[in-house]
Amino acid sequence: MRSQDLDRAGITDPEMRASYERCRELNAAHGKTYYLATLLLPPAKRPYVHALYGFARYADEIVDDLASTLSEQQKADELRSWGDRFFAALRRGRSDDPVCRAVVDTVLRWDIPVEHFEAFLHSMAMDLTVTGYDSYEDLYEYVYGSAAVIGLQMVPILEPTQPAAYEHAKDLGVAFQLANFVRDVGEDLQRGRVYLPRDELARFGVTRADLERRVVTREIRAALEFQIARVRALEEASRAGITMLHPSSQPCIEAARILYCGIVDAVEDIDYQVFTRRATVPTSRRLAVALPAWREARRARRLHGEGRPHGLNAPAAASGG
């Protein structure tokens, strides 16, 4: 992380700075689109977003590291233990964990509700025992914790101007997650999971066994088209919420919306061949979105300022340690 970002955020403690840098490294290595969008935020806001990503990524690694030799029960025990340590650190007001130190600081600075992290870890634990979902209502329990709360965690940092921004953030987070489910059908099967609701697959004459054959049939294509339509409906519903954020935050979220939801466009571009190809947003498209967004972000900061770069509770949270 550029030290200027940490300086502008008022993060001075060396160990705290190292923790934020560790989270930034996780974001840069594993969340390239997320990382690109984060660069559109005011520099002082970027470390907090990296910290939230670091928390999510670390938990996800416990659950989904394909190289892990741990049993599902051992993974569940490790996830629970790590979560317990995190929540204890939140109550204490500080953490010695290389990742959680920055996360605790971010949560305290921005008054992010602890229940969002509880919901996230609940969904991560579901991945260790649940291999499919009967309906969208059943799936929503999972996506609320794995995706909707990510949006809810972010909103305080983005500085909403209206309470309705939170509901729109949930919609956008779920749209991102569902787009990933469409793209990753083949990859998720490798992990023994299907995130497309059984009743919706059945509507098009598709079973789990059909997916496991890894051949895109007319029926599977139709089922994926249905899922893509939901992504686009949620994306459209979320758009009003972007205008309810501080002007310096809007270019970041608008770019993220276009690029993440653009995953389903990429699925269409590869003719739904999700078992043999990974749909990606082309670099040319990323640049076409990012460059104008970068100019707009600079303009917004110049006209409207950067919001509250030290958070809502900087004096209490800035002591580090």
Image (cartoon, helix red, strand yellow):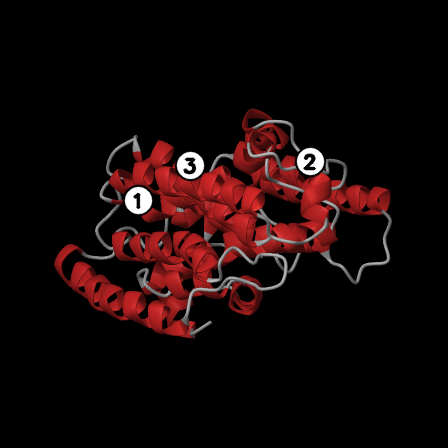
In this figure, which residue is indicated by the disc labeled 2?
132
Which residue is drawn at the image coordinates 49% and 54% (left, top)? 319
In this figure, which residue is indicated by the disc labeled 3?
170
Classify residue 98 as left or right of residue 257.
right
- Mark 2, mark 3: which one is toward the viewer? 2
Classify residue 279 as left or right of residue 192.
left
Q: Position of residue 138 (x, y in %)?
A: 60, 27
Classify residue 66 as left or right of residue 40.
right
Mark number for residue 159? 1
Q: Position of residue 105 (x, y in %)?
A: 51, 50
How packed mark 2 is, by other alpha carbons closer than 10 Å (few <14, some 14-19, many 20 or more), is some
How packed mark 1 is, by other alpha carbons closer than 10 Å (few <14, some 14-19, many 20 or more), is many
Residue type at mark 2: give it.
Gly
Asked if residue 85 shows in the view, the reply is: no
Q: Earlier in the sequence, mark 1 or mark 2?
A: 2
Residue type at mark 3: give it.
Lys
Classify residue 67 as left or right of residue 28.
right
Q: Give above or below for 148 relative to 25.
A: above
Q: Give above or below for 207 relative to 297.
A: above
Q: Secondary structure at mark 1?
A: loop
Taking depth in this image into account, of 87 and 203 the one nearest to the observer is: 203
Query: How much space separates mark 1 and mark 2, taking CA atoms?
Result: 36 Å
Which residue is drawn at the image coordinates 60% and 52% (left, top)? 216
- Mark 1, mark 2: which one is toward the viewer? 2
Residue at the extreme left: 303
